[in-house]
Image (cartoon, rainbow, N blue to C red):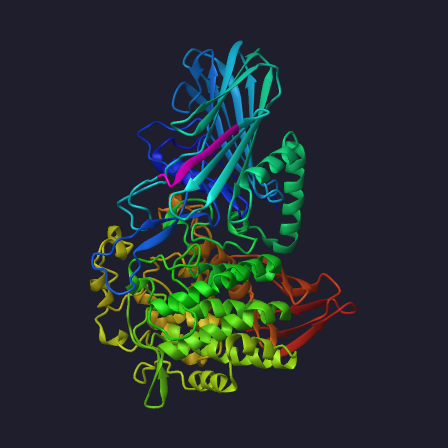
Amino acid sequence: MNKVYSVEDFPLDEKTMMLHETLFHNANGYIGVRGTLEEGVPQEYNTMRGTYVNGFYDVIPMKQAESLCNLVEEKETMVNVADVQTMHLSFDGETFSLFSGEITNLIRTLDMEAGTTTRSMQWSSPHGHEVQIQFCRMASFTHKSVFTIACKVTSLNFDGELTVSSKHSGIVANYANPSDPRLAAEGRAYLRPQANILENGVSYLVTHTTKSNLELCTAVAHRFSKPGSSLVTYSADAHCYDTNYTCRLHPGETLLVEKYAVIQDSIRSDNCLQDAQKEIESVYGKLDALYQQQREYLSEFWKCANMEIDEDDESNLAIAFNMYQLLQSCGSDGKCGIAAKGLSGEGYEGHYFWDTDIYILPFFVLTNPALARGLLNFRYSTLDAARENAKLVGHQRGALFPWRTIHGKECSGYFPSGTAQYHITGDIAYAAVKYYLATGDTEYLIKEGAEILIETARLWCDVGNWNDGKFMINDVTGPDEYTCIVNNNYYTNACAKYNLNWAVKAANILRKMDAFQALADKLALRDAELDEFQRAADAMYLPYNEKLGINPQDDSFLQKPIWDLKNTPKENFPLLLHYHPLVLYRHQVCKQADTVLAYYLFDGLEDRETVARSFAYYEPITTHDSSLSTCIFSIVASSLGEKEKAWNYFGSSITLDLQNKHGNTGDGIHTANMGGSYMVIVNGFAGVRIQEDGLHMAPYLPAAWSGYRFQMQYRGSSLELSVHKTGYCISLLNDVPVTILLPGTSIVLDRKASEYVQAWQEG
């Protein structure tokens, strides 16, 4: 399938500009550049012109109205680090703009195999100059610090002086929207000038964050295909270099401008300026080679991550787009994670949530385990901060991972739906276990995974209490942020039970490898504490209502009146923007999957009848105001055999960003939903589950499709599942044998029998 997304002749309004800045952004997991117009937009447009570095942040005040004990008073926030995009074109004094003259053949394209975005158009100036202009951008996957722009200008009838003014600005402000709580309330510049150097035509700007004490260096170099005059000037007030180039352009001639930008930061570099100098020297003038390397990198990515849907171009494009965006968002160096908006915008201020561990990591576990390991490495690097966070909240032992963070500190100012979401600790433990089960990576378990499981288990023992022979966890918030500070949230207790069980299992696995004693000595861990973990897990209280035969979301949930969603005006969604939190907390209304999510993650914890009744109960009271929700409802519907419902929920999920269904994609992509749409196909339609006893599959074909196929990795085995109208086929693509558990049977694929074909059974 050709993995290309494009739009043509689109409206030039602020909303569309913001949306396209997101959809056509360039990122590689380290840097991200919004898809803004090189030449800019009219002054009255409030768009988000940003360049970001994953994990690079500053610290700003977050004053509480009442400074109660250890409430968060400051937060980490993602920084707009520079403007290396701006490029103005002038034709005999007439400056090119989409908002002047006449524009024809306007096209924006994202090529997910080339790893580039392009914008091309034909412009007729007010004075009749006609030119063809194309901008091509790339954030390199093989040279993570490198971003390039290639500007090609072809004269159709213009015969005159072409001037290029290319900016390199080191001091820029973050975006702000005071009407949306998911964005910063005011735009600020978080960097201060430190040094500026012009060397061999290359401009270097060194800046420093105001409080986090981080350094950044950006380098910019240009290459022009025609002889001309060039002058580079520096403005101290703006900490900005301006490269002005002029040449003569005749009809039929083309000028190619190559702009190379390099970004280095002190989180990864001991000498940002020196490393920027080395990198710009290594890539300058080698744009074609960079393009080729980009294609080769993505070719390998798609070999492992490829997914195809027969005769459904829209779904094919949407799922490819979603997977590509996850790759663009994924930190790979163990020093950063995946933000809720990736590197595409400033929504949620670049914070990492539980999205990575529950919704996104599964994609990389099955397609690129090395990237999954990097994400887990990052969580481990913040374990000490999680231990400190637990102490701040009043716990005597264990690690409490922050609800939203960049560097490891809690950044949630509203603790009822922030810090109180203790389940993130169980989510991270769950991710560690699933990675281990899928890869068999015992090195990870020894070096990092088991320690995370022990420290998170300690937290549950400290936060929980015994009551009438049951272990209970009070005053927490589950995934559903429309119900906060409750006792015995079903999802949280299920997470804790799984976490506690696996802390004991991990210890036993390490004993068999003679690796337990080193961990026990490091953590002062004794067998009595492991016994405590097991007792708490075995006695974990999971709410159940005998009358309805369902699992209540928490102890008090069923006591509340049901919100009348049918008669709630459409313009009042999402509810969090139109109703006081206390009003929401006092009703049975869910923002997103909560108990239903537990049924997917902890498959087999409840019997099928309880799951079915509970699913039917939560359906009419869930708004899906969160983009994390419909994908989970689809997966659970599949497991219950409700295929039509599964399909309908999937349709709401897969094209969420491409069709801007939540109306806020302009602030950045929804990375968790993108991972969720992948999970719907793999874990929902294909029934893939990775359990302790092995790899499970239970595929079916949605009625609207004629077939689908995808590849995945499991413990070194490379597999392809192909599902079609007559049945399905599982193929082993390498020589690593694998056992697969299917409904009612199990199969072994190896070199001798590398394929299994199963026809659909009647009924």
Residue 324, position in %: x, y? 54, 48
Residue at image coords 46%, 70%: 600
Q: Can you tell which quarter of the image residue 592 is in? A: bottom left
In the displayed structure image, the side of residue 754 where residue 305 appears, left or right: left
Against 206, residue 450 (above or below) is: below
Given residues 92 and 444, the one toward you in this image is 444
Q: Residue at x 63, y 46 (%)?
A: 298
Q: Is residue 201 left or right of residue 216?
A: right
**Rendered view: 761 above or below 117:** below
Residue 73 highlighted magenta (yes or no): no
Residue nearer the viewer, 152 or 175? 175
The residue located at (66%, 69%) in the rendering is 758
Give residue 310's position: percent from left, percent from top: 59, 53
Estimate the x, y position of residue 347 in percent, counting from the top left.
38, 48
Q: Where does residue 143 sit, x and y in percent of width and height? A: 61, 42
The rendered magenta stretch, by its main secondary structure, is classed as: strand
**Which residues, given as a range, are shown in magenta?**
189-197
Image quarter where the C terminus lies is bottom right
Quadrant in which residue 170 is drawn: top left
